[in-house]
Image (cartoon, rainbow, N blue to C red):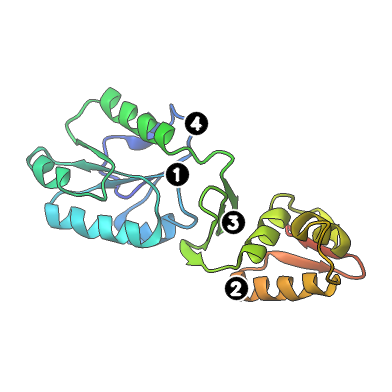
Amino acid sequence: MVQAEDARAPDIARLAAATPATVETVDGDSLEAALHPSPSLVVVVAATSDELSHRVRTVKAFTRSPLMAVVLPDMVEATAAQTAVDDFTTVEACGTDLLARIQRLLRAHPDSGEIIRRGDLAINSATCEVSLGGRLIELTFKEYSLLKFLAGSPGRVFTREVLLSRVWGYDYYGGDRTVDVHVRRLRSKIEDANHTFIDTVRNIGYRFRSEGQ
């Protein structure tokens, strides 16, 4: 997904449509919402150096996605000094240049097959990080493994025995009660009044909710 932080970008949506990414253009007031879940690329448009610095800090507070800036010509030097910006161009640049830069960043930071997105929940298998609404969630390795396994097959019901063998391994000698304990701890970290991800299937086991459930 490509996110453009400001609608003043030179037709980012039209240009980025030529990439496999999904494009959304939002205004500054909805920046935080646009970064939930974390996108593949963020495009920030700014008219002043102070505006750029503020928006870059805000973006980086919610996501570790690569960041591209689109700025005025007299801001090139200041933008080049922004270490958090992965690439930039000016508002006067031709569409071909902007598209090429977007595509280059997407190739350099691929997330296909590495990030599982389930609503506001994002599971990054490359970094073993989990975020909810852009906020990093601290999980133990076993909690992370359990979540990734369940989220990889939404809607499918897994018995406790299957979860033990697939997540804990055949050499685990504990009882299936440990699955219940870990699911309970996992739910306490990723679920709240607005988010429910894991269902208990009575007398069978657990499933990760699919869309529409």
Q: Earlier in the sequence, mark 1 or mark 3?
A: 1
The nearer-to-camera label among 2 and 4 is 2
Q: Label 3: which residue?
A: 119
Q: Is residue 204 left or right of residue 143?
A: right
Q: CA distance from mark 2 to mark 1?
A: 24 Å
Q: Label 2: which residue?
A: 189
Is there any visible trace of residue 211 in the rendered image?
no
153 or 90: nearer the viewer: 153
Q: Residue at x 28, y 30 (%)?
A: 98
Q: Earlier in the sequence, mark 3 or mark 4?
A: 4
Q: Earlier in the sequence, mark 3 or mark 2?
A: 3
Report if the CB atoms under discs 2 and 1 are less than 8 Å apart.
no
Q: Residue at x 47, y 42 (%)?
A: 1
Q: Position of residue 114 (x, y in %)?
A: 56, 44
Q: Secondary structure at mark 1?
A: loop
Q: Residues within 10 Å of mark 4 (few under 14, many from 20)?
A: few
Q: CA distance from mark 1 to mark 3?
A: 15 Å
Q: Position of residue 118 (x, y in %)?
A: 62, 54
Q: Label 4: which residue?
A: 20
Q: Residue furthest left?
A: 74
The nearer-to-camera label among 3 and 2 is 2
Quarter of the image for residue 94 reads top left
Q: CA distance from mark 1 to mark 4?
A: 11 Å
Q: Residue furthest top?
A: 96
The nearer-to-camera label among 1 and 3 is 1
Mark on residue 40?
1
Amino acid type shown at disc 3: Gly
Q: Earlier in the sequence, mark 2 or mark 1?
A: 1
Amino acid type shown at disc 1: Ser
Amino acid type shown at disc 4: Pro
